[in-house]
Structures are given as C-alpha cells and as structure tokens.
Image (spheres, rainbow, N blue to C red):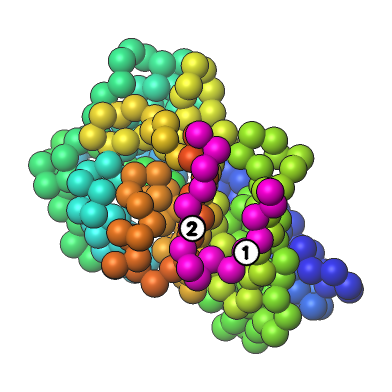
Amino acid sequence: MPHGEWADFTFDGIGTRWEISTPRPLAGTLRSRLLDVVEKYDGDWSRFRPDSTVSAMARQPGRYTLPGEAAPLGRLYRSLYDITAGAMTPLVGSSLEQLGYDATYSLVPAGAAVPAPRWDDALDWDGAVLTTSAPLVLDIGAAGKGQLVDLVAAELRSSGVASFVIDASGDLLHSGPDPLQVALEHPYDPTKAIGTVSLAGGALCASASNRRAWGDGLHHVLDGTTGRPVSTAVATWTMASSTMVADALATALFFTPGAELERSFDFSWLTVFSDGSAAYSSGFEGTLFT
C-alpha cells in the first residue's frame, strides 16, 4: 500500500482479508462502524452463514426485503445477465454447490455440472425486494465484495476521511491526490507480475481462474447456462469509478469481450487468455511486461 507514514487497519470480513490505509490512524469509533458495515453486509448476503437472509432464501421461497444496496446490485446483475445471455447470473450458487464450492467448503463435486435456474423463472428482483418461486441459492460474489468496498468508502468519507486505499484481497479503491502504482499478478505465479498500472481516484478489480480453484479444472467462475467453469480467459482486470461495477465487469470479461461491455459501461479493462495472448482497452493505462 502507500509508502510513507500511512497507517493500516487490517481485519477479516466476508471470508477475506481487508486492509484500509489512511494518512493517520482511524479512531476506534470509526473502526467499529466500519466493522459493523462489513458484518451487516455479510449477515444479509452470505450464502455461507446459516443466519443470513440469502440462506433463508435457500431454505424456502417467499418475499424477502434486503437493504437499499440491493437495488443497484440487482440492476447491475440484470444488465450483465442480459448482455451475457445468462452466462453471468446471481443464481449460480446451486451450480457452485454442485461442484463442491458449498457452505462447508467440501470441494467435492456432488455430480455432473448443473445450469443455474433461469432468472425469470425463479426470481423477481424489484429494488430491494426479492421474491422467489422456489428455494434458490443466491450468489452475489461477482459484485458483492466490490459493493461492500464502496459502502466502506462511503462510511470513511462521511467521517471526513478523504484520502485512503481499501484493499479487499485484490479489489482496490483509491481516494486521494497521489496515484498508486499497482502490480498486476501473474495468473500462474502469484510471486510474479505481468505488468503495472497507475490507480488514481478509482477502483481496480481483478478476477482469475487460479483463485478459488480445486479439483480437476474446477474454479469459481462458472457459466450459468452450463454450470461449468469457463476455460478461455484466465485473468481479467478492470478499472472504473465504482468498485461494485469494476468487480462485476472483471467477471463479465470471462464471458463477453471487453469492447462489447464498453457499449454499456464506462470502464477500462485487460483480459489474459489461456493461450497467453491478451486484449485490452485503449483506456487501460498500464504497462505489460514482455
């Protein structure tokens, strides 16, 4: 994180490591509020906690009211669901569980891959109200962590903290006058970098099939139409003003070319494919090593 005399606040939340760097140490009361934001989000959206709203949805159908952040999250997911023809979907949770990425982290497939339910058959997502016609496993992992970064940033800004870097295990949000140089992790060797990028006042998110991988060719980026892991792209990076949008688009790049996504979203991107080639937008102002 930033060099110099910045202070770091580190903690675990939503199953991942967080680091918030600020010019001065955060007050204890603000730290407590930040932890409350993370805990509340996890309590609503986690499919790994039996007490969450999402876990209740997996047990029985019904009408569920979630916090206000559900509305923009639902709109984003619906847009990407339509753009990717159902490949990217928040209904992929049952497909992940089928392949072993379940609440107990068994990592043992229960059988052949199963497609996710069709959105219009299983779910009505109207603002913050989700109505289900059958038990379903909602998984917002492709955008939820990014949205939570934005919520944590809003809490910092509301307390007068204008300069900070939030690192939620690779989902980065930078705020302040001095750009941050970030290394782009090699998709096959986390000790190496394939390039660098300058992050100035925005979000940088990455997705890679080598993260959360298990078994024979199994990883967490599934095509909702088949329930099987994708195999063409191996790593993606996105830059946008919103961490939620950058996070979601880093996954969408596994299914849809960046140039097509640029028709609907203002962002820059880099995709590395399994054959070693790469594609990137004109606005991705990074340096790739040869």
Image vertical order of residue 269 relative to residue 117, above or below: below
- Residue placed most toward the observer, 50 or 13: 13
Farthest residue to the top: give it.
111
- Residue placed most toward the observer, 164 or 226: 226
Type of amino acid under label 1: Gly
Report if the CB atoms under discs 1 and 2 are less than 8 Å apart.
Answer: yes
Type of amino acid under label 2: Tyr
Image position, residue 144 (x, y; %): 44, 54
Q: Which residues are magenta?
A: 275-290
Q: Quadrant of the N terminus?
A: bottom right
Q: Is residue 204 magenta?
A: no
SS label for mark 2: strand
Q: Which residue is mark 2?
A: 280
Q: Which residue is mark 1?
A: 286
Q: Main secondary structure of the magenta part?
A: loop
Image position, residue 191 (x, y; %): 76, 40
Pointer 2 local density, CA inside 10 Å: few below 14, some 14–19, many at least 20: some
From the viewer's perspective, is 270 left or right of 170?
A: left
Farthest residue to the front: give it.
290
Pointer 1 local density, CA inside 10 Å: few below 14, some 14–19, many at least 20: some
Alpha-carbon span between mark 1 and mark 2: 10 Å
Image position, residue 86 (x, y; %): 22, 44
Q: Quadrant of residue 20?
A: bottom right
From the viewer's perspective, is 115 left or right of 207?
A: left
Residue at 63% in and 76% down: 200
SS label for mark 1: strand
Residue at 34% in and 44% down: 255
Question: Can residue 154 be seen?
Answer: yes
